[in-house]
Image (cartoon, grey):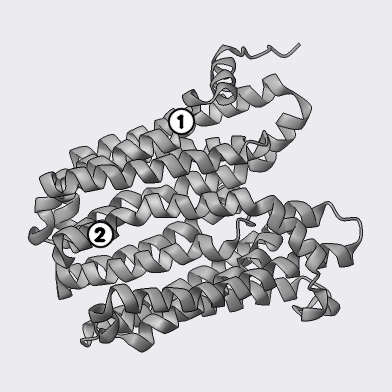
């Protein structure tokens, strides 16, 4: 029994899930405390700033998350592999600083009253998010099998910053203090990722400008361009509802919706982590046998959807008690919103695998198209439904747009539609 437990905890997907659940759980605890101690208006302000911070992530990652390691690992020359890795990090650092400054200017322009309440803290948050670029060093360590050390170190950072935020709230700190700590967490996480990279690399592989190679950078930027734009559009359609609620209904309604979204989206880490874990298996199967690849894709798809369905049913039934326990009586009026919003997860779970399929089969432009139409659909439905139904309308807009952009778009493309029906018809071959 103990042997099985040790084997389970040693599994890469389990370790990564534990780390990401802990980090998301820490954020959820802070959200619960802000709601109970400071109220829905304060939570709305906090949620709005964090949404703007979320917009930075796809802008600064340049669409390179999966591409860098793939290109670096195919190089026979170790120096060339280092050039690909470190060039990507340098490009993302520069993009982080550039877009961070633009985000500060934009937030000052559109929300001067919120910015005035914490100009230094909000600016530090947007700038320090550039250290998220160092996650490429973590991906490299994951590829080499050193994932446990990095995951445990990140848990330690999250635990430290969680304690600081809890103590701060207990002693009367406000939203600005919390935003500052989030920014510091980006910095500390980047430092940890670089530390473990240096721990397992030779001294000459230190992060240095000498490894920047523009020809390698240009190659990666060209190949990642579709994924970059797709990622930007994806976050827009995932997060735009919070911005639109604030402009139409005010900051208190934004706080109520932020509370629902925090719980509903807590589960999204599962498909993202598992899809990344299964990507090498899918790629290997694709290179060896198309029917075998389709069988694996179908099996994983059914597993992902079944898990999402189980979560959605459970949360729908217990939504009132979840809101009461997490946020208190004042937020139970948003129970129906949670019961609607949580069903979007069924499509998000499946989309994690579909995204891998699009990359493997070379259909990256279709990913951008699906997210683009999803974003337009979400914005249009929010304009139509929020004035009539309040934040319930935003939840319906999210569900409908996610359903299209995450799954039903495949029926509007001849190639993916053919893949889908071929996958359904493929039969498993009995071992001989």
Q: Which numbered disc, 2 or 1, marks the residue closer to the eye?
A: 1
Q: Tell me where residue 48 appears, x and y as whole percent.
A: 29, 67
Quarter of the image with the C terminus in it: top right
Count of residue discs: 2
Quarter of the image with the N terminus in it: top right
Asked which quadrant contains residue 422, the reply is top right
Find residue 258 and name its label: 2
Q: Is residue 242 left or right of residue 42?
A: right
Q: Is residue 329 left or right of residue 157?
A: left
Asked which quadrant contains residue 195, the reply is bottom right
Is residue 32 something that shows in the picture? Answer: yes
- First in sequence: mark 2 or mark 1? 2
Nearest the eye: 161 or 45: 45
Nearest the eye: 196 or 55: 55
Query: Which residue is rendered at x = 17% and y = 57% of the image?
Result: 325
Q: Secondary structure at mark 1?
A: helix
Query: Which residue is rendered at x = 60% and y = 36% of the image?
Result: 358
Categorize mark 1 by other alpha carbons within 10 Å: few (<14), some (14-19), many (20+): some
Q: Is residue 398 left or right of residue 321?
A: right
Q: Which residue is mark 1?
A: 409
Q: Is residue 200 left or right of residue 248?
A: right
Residue 384 position (above or below residue 50) = above
Query: Which residue is rendered at x = 46% and y = 47% of the image?
Result: 270
Q: Tell me where residue 24 appears, x and y as whole percent.
A: 40, 61
Residue 239 position (above or below residue 107) = above
Nearest the eye: 73 or 118: 118
Nearest the eye: 347 or 430: 347
Is residue 346 something that shows in the picture? Answer: no
Q: Tell me where residue 153 appears, x and y as whole percent.
A: 56, 71
């Amino acid at each position: 029994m103990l042997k099985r437990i040790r084997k389970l905890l040693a599994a890469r997907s389990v370790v990564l899930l534990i780390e990401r659940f802990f980090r998301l759980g820490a954020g959820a605890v802070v959200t619960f405390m802000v709601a109970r101690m400071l109220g829905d208006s304060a939570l709305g302000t906090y949620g709005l700033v964090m949404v703007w911070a979320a917009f930075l992530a796809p802008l600064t990652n340049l669409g390179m998350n999966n591409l860098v390691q793939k290109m670096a690992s195919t190089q026979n020359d170790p120096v060339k592999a280092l050039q690909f890795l470190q060039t990507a990090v340098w490009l993302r650092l520069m993009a982080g600083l550039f877009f961070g400054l633009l985000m500060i200017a934009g937030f000052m322009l559109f929300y001067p009253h919120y910015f005035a309440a914490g100009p230094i803290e909000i600016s530090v948050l947007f700038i320090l998010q550039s250290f998220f670029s160092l996650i490429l060093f973590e991906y490299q360590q994951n590829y080499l099998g050193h994932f446990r050390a990095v995951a445990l170190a990140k848990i330690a950072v999250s635990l430290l910053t969680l304690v600081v935020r809890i103590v701060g709230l207990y002693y009367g700190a406000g939203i600005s203090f919390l935003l500052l700590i989030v920014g510091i967490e980006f910095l500390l996480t980047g430092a940890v990722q670089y530390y473990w990279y240096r721990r397992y690399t030779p001294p000459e592989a230190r992060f240095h400008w000498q490894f920047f190679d523009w020809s390698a950078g240009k190659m990666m930027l060209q190949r990642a361009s579709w994924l970059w734009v797709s990622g930007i559009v994806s976050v827009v359609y995932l997060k735009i509802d919070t911005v639109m609620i604030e402009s139409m209904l005010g900051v208190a309604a934004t706080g109520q919706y932020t509370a629902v979204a925090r719980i509903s989206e807590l589960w999204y880490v599962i498909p993202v982590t598992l899809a990344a874990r299964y990507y090498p298996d899918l790629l290997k199967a694709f290179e060896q046998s198309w029917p075998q690849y389709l069988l694996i894709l179908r099996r994983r798809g059914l597993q992902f959807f079944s898990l999402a369905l189980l979560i959605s049913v459970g949360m729908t039934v217990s939504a009132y008690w979840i809101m009461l326990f997490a946020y208190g009586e004042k937020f139970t009026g948003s129970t129906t919103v949670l019961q609607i919003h949580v069903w979007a997860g069924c499509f998000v779970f499946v989309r994690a695998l579909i995204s891998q399929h699009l990359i493997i089969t070379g259909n990256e432009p279709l990913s951008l198209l699906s997210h683009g139409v999803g974003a337009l659909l979400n914005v249009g439905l929010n304009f139509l439904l929020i004035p009539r139904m309040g934040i319930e309308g935003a939840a319906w807009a999210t569900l409908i747009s996610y359903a299209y952009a995450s799954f039903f778009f495949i029926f509007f493309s001849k190639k993916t539609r053919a893949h889908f029906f071929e996958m359904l018809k493929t039969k498993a071959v009995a071992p001989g």
